[in-house]
Image (cartoon, grey):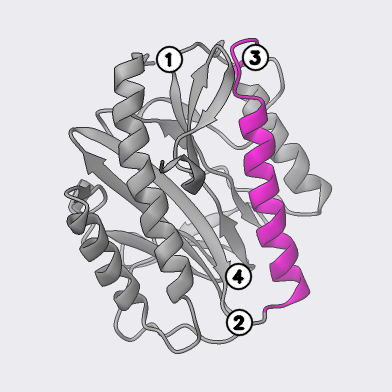
Amino acid sequence: MILKSPWENEKMRISNAIVAEVLEALREKIRPGIATIELDESARQMVCARKADPAFLGYRGYPFSLCVSVNNEVVHGLPAATRILKEGDIVSLDFGAVYDGYYGDAAITVPVGKVSAEAELLIRTTEEALYLGIQEAKVTNRLYDISHAIQKHAESRGFSVVRQFVGHGIGTALHEPPEVPNYGQPGQGIRLQTGMVLAIEPMINAGSYEVTILSDGWTAVTKDGSLSAHFEHCVAITEDGPRILSRLDRLN
């Protein structure tokens, strides 16, 4: 675990504010008929206009700035000119930025037009699970208190949490220790400390938690073909409680 000083948290506030701005602009672009590559191009242009760099481009060989995961795609969906969003889809946008050496990272899931009742519930539950997890990110708790809150809420709605991918620490690297699972027993794991910054990111499936990787080597999909949703925030643990760095209302 790498603890951040107040001035480092301020740098991360800026990188995460850029991420929040880009994601909210992309949310407005979601509509039936848009190609997912257009979202990637917009993300890259917006982050460069803010004098930051896209964090995912080239990371471990990833070829795009944005992950665009549609319907049963859990994470790391590849944008493409031929991938056209249609009415009833749900799409997860995962984006990161680097500003002055510090990383920001967040994700949202957005309905495309009118979606099914199941899709609406899945999206709402995943976002609620994120905020319930964030509530547990305080110095009196342990790491798996976050994990348990997410798992408990997801499973109370009949959904499952992905095991294969987890949240993580973040700072001068995109991925730092500790890993932040979306499942676990309360009261377990390392004790949370002031100065930790965690990317908390529930990935919740409508069916089984099992996933598989497509032949492109990147796209993770649900093994049973069920829908999946993903939300993420970067959260600083402070003496005053969790501080969400990647929320749009922190821009100013």
Q: Are marks 4 and 1 in contact (CB under 8 Å)?
A: no
**Mark 2 lies on residue:** 113
Q: Comparing marks 3 and 4, which lies closer to the viewer?
A: 3
| In this rendering, position of residue 161 left or right of residue 32 | right
Q: Is residue 127 magenta?
A: yes
What residue type is disc 1 on? Gly
Q: SS class of the residue under badge 1?
A: loop
Q: SS class of the residue under badge 4?
A: loop
* Mark linked to residue 195: 1
- The location of residue 102, given as percent across then percent down, is 25, 32
Give the residues drawn in magenta, as a range. 115-142
Q: Main secondary structure of the magenta part?
A: helix
Which callout, 3 or 2, points at the residue further toward the start of the chain? 2
Quote the CA–CA distance across marks 1 and 3.
Answer: 14 Å
Of 137 and 13, nearer the camera is 13
Which callout, 3 or 4, points at the residue further toward the start of the chain? 3
Of 44 and 200, nearer the camera is 44
Quote the CA–CA distance across marks 2 and 1.
Answer: 40 Å
Which quadrant of the figure has residue 29?
Answer: bottom left
Which quadrant of the figure has residue 141?
Answer: top right
| Residue 47 is at least partly visible in this image | yes
Which callout, 4 or 1, points at the residue further toward the start of the chain? 1
- The location of residue 110, given as percent across then percent down, is 56, 67
Which callout, 1 or 3, points at the residue further toward the start of the chain? 3
* Mark linked to residue 225: 4
Quote the CA–CA distance across marks 4 and 1.
Answer: 39 Å
Q: Are marks 3 and 2 in contact (CB under 8 Å)?
A: no
What residue type is disc 4 on? Gly
Residue at 23% x, 42% y is: 98
**Mark 3 lies on residue:** 141
